[in-house]
Image (tube, rainbow, N blue to C red):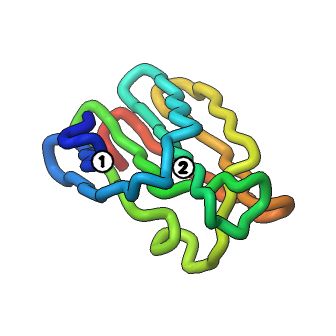
Amino acid sequence: ANHGGNLYFFGGKDRTLVFRLSDRRRIQLFKTFEHPGITITAIGLSDEHARTIDNEVVAAIALGSESGVVWIERLEQFLAREPAVLKAADGVDYHESAVSSLLFNHAFPQMASASLDGS
């Protein structure tokens, strides 16, 4: 959702992340993987002054399930490493669970998984 041109809200019933974009930033990537009972979303921003690969900076990532948001965090806090650039993302279903693979920079993989019960 966008309020006032640059205030964004992401989240679910249990947690919400709110951040404000400066006029020089634009959302370039909004990629969502939907599986039965789970949604994983990556939000990428471009910044004219960013010094990252391809000028693409991932600002937040959310992993949610039917029982509510499992976690939603500013990516810098999640990875504890900067800069972080989302290069690829993929997801697969396995029985009642979903597993997603997220690749940052050139060789920095992260895995995220969740089941219908929110674990």
Quarter of the image holding residue 3? top left
Along the line of sight, the residue nearer the viewer: 20 or 15:
20
Badge nearest the viewer, 2 or 1:
1
User: Residue 45's mark?
Assistant: 2
Is residue 53 toward the left or the right of residue 31 in the image? right
Q: Earlier in the sequence, mark 2 or mark 1?
A: 1
Tell me the residue at 27%/41% (across/down): 5
Is residue 68 toward the left or the right of residue 55 in the image? left
Asked whether the viewer can see residue 28, the reply is: yes
Asked whether the viewer can see residue 68, the reply is: no
The amino acid type of the residue labelled 1 equals: Asn
Q: Residue furthest top?
A: 36
Q: Residue furthest right?
A: 106
The amino acid type of the residue labelled 2 equals: Leu
Tell me the residue at 55%/79% (across/down): 80
Along the line of sight, the residue nearer the viewer: 18 or 68:
18
Give the CA separation, mark 2 to mark 1.
12 Å
Label 1 crowd bin: few (<14), some (14–19), many (20+), radius 10 Å: some
Question: Of helix, strand and loop, which one carries label 2?
Answer: strand
User: Residue 6's mark?
Assistant: 1
Quarter of the image holding residue 72? bottom left
